[in-house]
Amino acid sequence: MQSKKHSFIEALSNTAIGFVISYASTFLIFPLVGLQSSSSKNLLITMFFTVISILRGYFIRRYFNGKIVRLNTAKMPFKLHCFDCEIEMPVKRDEKGYFCSNCGLRH
Ligand SMILES: [Zn+2]
């Protein structure tokens, strides 16, 4: 699983590259759609969307990361070393605690 810090760094790197491209694009798109602007306004607009982009990238990453972790833990049964079977075995749980799914030994 990707750490929260790594998710943030990845989103930040992605957005830093996007920032340069977006800022340059404002000088092309604004005149094309008839918007009067200046380099300082373009910079402010780009900074605004950059912050939104960082947050969007971070939360989408965390959402899907959590989903992957939940899927993986659902697929893989919890295993413990069973001293009777002498190997790691999937365990089941009841009101008294965990027991080996193969031989029933209590853990
Ligand atoms: Zn066992």
Image (cartoon, rainbow, N blue to C red):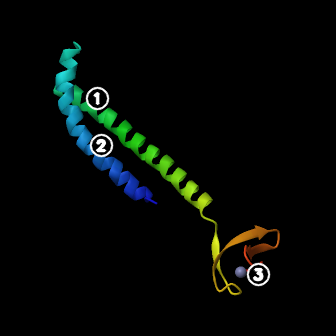
Left or right: residue 64 compared with residue 48: right
Disc 2 is placed on an element classified as helix
- Residue 36 seen in this snapshot: no
Q: Dots 3 and 1: beta carbons under 8 Å?
A: no
Instruction: State which quadrant residue 75 falls in.
Output: bottom right
Ranked by sequence position, the earlier of labels 3 and 2 is: 2
Residue at left 21%, top 36%? Answer: 21
Tell me the crowding category of disc 2: few under 14, some 14 to 19, or many 20 or more residues within 10 angstroms, Cα based.
many
Q: What residue sits right under mark 1 in the picture?
A: 45
Q: Residue furthest right?
A: 95
User: Which is closer to the viewer, label 3 or label 2?
Assistant: 3
What x and y, as percent, mark residue 5? 40, 58
Q: Amino acid at mark 3?
A: Leu
Q: What residue sits right under mark 3 in the picture?
A: 105
User: Which is closer to the viewer, label 3 or label 1?
Assistant: 3
Dot 3 beta carbon under 8 Å from ligand 1 = yes
Is 22 drawn above or below residue 81 in the view shown?
A: above
- Residue 7 seen in this snapshot: yes
Disc 1 is placed on an element classified as helix
Disc 3 is placed on an element classified as loop
Q: What residue sits right under mark 2 in the picture?
A: 15
Q: Amino acid at mark 1?
A: Ile
What x and y, as percent, mark residue 69? 53, 57
Left or right: residue 74 compared with residue 93: left
- Quadrant (top left, top right, bottom left, bottom right) of the C terminus: bottom right
Q: CA distance from mark 2 to mark 1?
A: 14 Å
**In the foreground, 61 or 42:** 61
Q: CA distance from mark 3 to mark 2?
A: 53 Å
Instruction: State which quadrant residue 36 falls in.
Output: top left
Ranked by sequence position, the earlier of labels 2 and 1 is: 2
Q: Dots 2 and 1: beta carbons under 8 Å?
A: no
Q: Quadrant of ligand 1?
A: bottom right
